[in-house]
Amino acid sequence: MRAAALYSAAGSLLLTTLAATPAQSVPPAGPGSAEARGTAVAARRAAAAGIEFGRCPKAAELPRGIRCGTVSVPLDYARPDGKRIKLTVSRVRATHKDPDDGKREVPGQGALLFNPGGPGASGLYFPLVGMVPEWKRIAAAYDLVGYAPRGVAPSAPLSCQDPGDFFKGPRPAPTRPSDAYKEQRAAEAEAYARDCAERGGEALRHYHSLNNARDLEVVRAALGERRLTFLGASYGTYLGALYAELFPSHVRRMVFDAVVNPDPEQVWYRNNLDQSEAFEDRWDDFKEWVAEHDAVYGLGDTARKVQDSYEEASARLAEEPAGGTVGPAQLQGAFLKAGYYDDYWPHRAEALSAYLKGDPQPLVDQAGTRTEEGAVGAENSNAVYTTVECNDAPWPTDFEVWDRDNTRLARRAPFETWDNVWTNLPCAYWRAPRQRPLDVRTAPGELPPTLVLAAERDAATPYEGALELRRRLAGSVLVTERDAGTHGIAAGPNACVNGHLEAYLLEGRLPARDTSCAPRPEPKPRA
C-alpha cells in the first residue's frame, strides 16, 4: 500500500486546494442505482454457478495443494449482461485438526477471504499461510481463500507499458529536484497516463475500488457463503470499508489490518502527502537502530552519522552505479522497504555497510534489476495500482499544485516525498472518469462488530487511518501494537495481537473496548 494517512501532518500541512473535480467525475452509485441492481444480478448468477476448483494457472506457480477456479463478474456493473471478466480464486480447505490436540476435530466456519492490498497485489498465495504456526488454529476452522482482483494477472490483467521498459535504472533520486528534472518526470507521467488509456481502452474506467468491492460480493456468493468473513490488509482495509458501507447485512466478521484512512477528503492525494511524512519518522527509527549496532555495521553511532553514510553511498552510486543497475533511486527503493517491514533492517544495513567497504554485491542483490518474469509482474502491479487510485477520486490536474505541496513537505520529510510524487503523478494527467469516494459510515447495529489492527508507527498506513475507521464503523474495536511500525500485524510474531485475532475469528469475541499490545522485539543483527 503506497497511499495512506498521518495524523501529525493533518494540522500542520497547509494543503493547496485540489483542482476542481473534473467534469467527467462520476457520483457515487446509491442503493437503487444500476450498479447496485447489476451487483445483485451478478451475485445471483455466481451463487448458482459456484466455483469449479481444479489446477491453478501454470503461470501462478502455486503448489498442487492449492486449488483454483474462476468467478465471472461484469466489467461494468451497470450493464451486468454486457462484457464479463473472470477473476481467479485460490483455496485450501480447512484442516479441521486442532494443532494443540490432534485428536480433536475442529468444526468448520466457512471461508476466510483475504485481500493483501496494493492496489495491484495478488492474494492467490494466501492459502499457503495455513502452514505457518501462527495460522494453524485459523486454518483448522476456515477454508483459506485468496484471489487476484480485477486487473491483477491472471484476472483480466492490465498493462500500461512494455515490461522491459518498466525498470528504468539506474536513476537519480534528488531530494531537491531541479526544474528541468521535474519537467522530465512530469512528461514521463503524462506519457504513462496516455499509454494506460491507449492500452486499456474503454474498459480502463471500470477498474476502481467500488467495482473491487462489488467483485468481493460476487466472490462471496460464488463461494456459497451467506455472509462474508474477510481479512483485508493495507489497501484491503479500504476495500473492506467500502464493502461494509455497500453490503453491511452481508458481513459476518471483518478484520482490518494496517488501515488506510477512508475519509473521502483523504483519498488519495492527501493520503500520499501524509504517507510521505510518516516515512520520515520510520526512516529515523531505522537509522537509530543501525546506530545502536554500530559495532556490527560501522555506519555511525548516531542517526546523523548513519544518514551521512547513506548519502555517501547515494553519491557514489550517482557516479558509478553498482552492477550497472543500482543508482540512487534503486538505493532509495530498497531502503523504503525497511520503512515497511523491520525484518529488512539487518539485510539493508549489511548491504550498505558492505558497499561502503568495497563489496557492492549484497546491494546489487537487494536493489538490482529484477528478472524478466519479475518485471512482467511488477509492471502489471503498477498498472493496477495507478489505474485504481487514479480512477478512485479527484486529483490535482495542475503540476504546480503537486510542486508547491511537496516542495514544502520535502523540507521536513525528504526521504520519500519526491519518490511518492513520481509514483502517483500519472493521476494528474489521467484520461478516464474519476469516481467520487464513498463516505463510509455505519450506524450502531447496522454492521456486526469488526476488528481493527494497527501498529502505532506504521508509515505505509499511519495510525490516524485506524482511528478514523474506528470512528466510522460503529461497534468496531481497535487493537494497537504500541511503539511498533511493521506494516501489517495480523498473525505475526506478537502473541497478544494473535490472541485477539483468534478470539475474534474463531469465537466472534472482541475486547470490551479499544486495547493495546506491547511491541514485538526489535530485529537483531545477523551473525
Image (cartoon, rainbow, N blue to C red):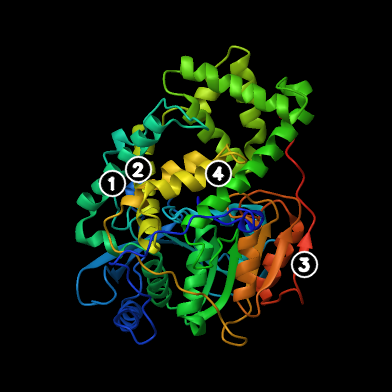
Which residue corresponds to the image point at 70% horizontal and 61% vertical from the top-left? 498
Decide if residue 287 is on the left or right side of residue 261: right
Mark-to-mark CA distance, 2 and 4: 31 Å
Mark-to-mark CA distance, 1 and 2: 8 Å
Residue marked by disc 3: 515
Residue marked by disc 4: 408
Crowding at dot 2, Cα within 10 Å, few <14 / some 14-19 / many 20+, comes out as many
User: In the rendering, which numbered label is found on residue 160?
Assistant: 1
Do residues under tags 1 and 3 come within 8 Å of each other at their CB atoms? no
Residue 318 versus residue 129 in the image, above or below: above
Three-letter amino acid code at the position of disc 4: Arg
Whichever of labels 4 and 1 marks the residue nearer the N terminus, that label is: 1
Mark-to-mark CA distance, 3 and 2: 40 Å
Residue marked by disc 2: 379
Crowding at dot 3, Cα within 10 Å, few <14 / some 14-19 / many 20+, comes out as few
User: In the rendering, which numbered label is found on residue 13?
Assistant: none
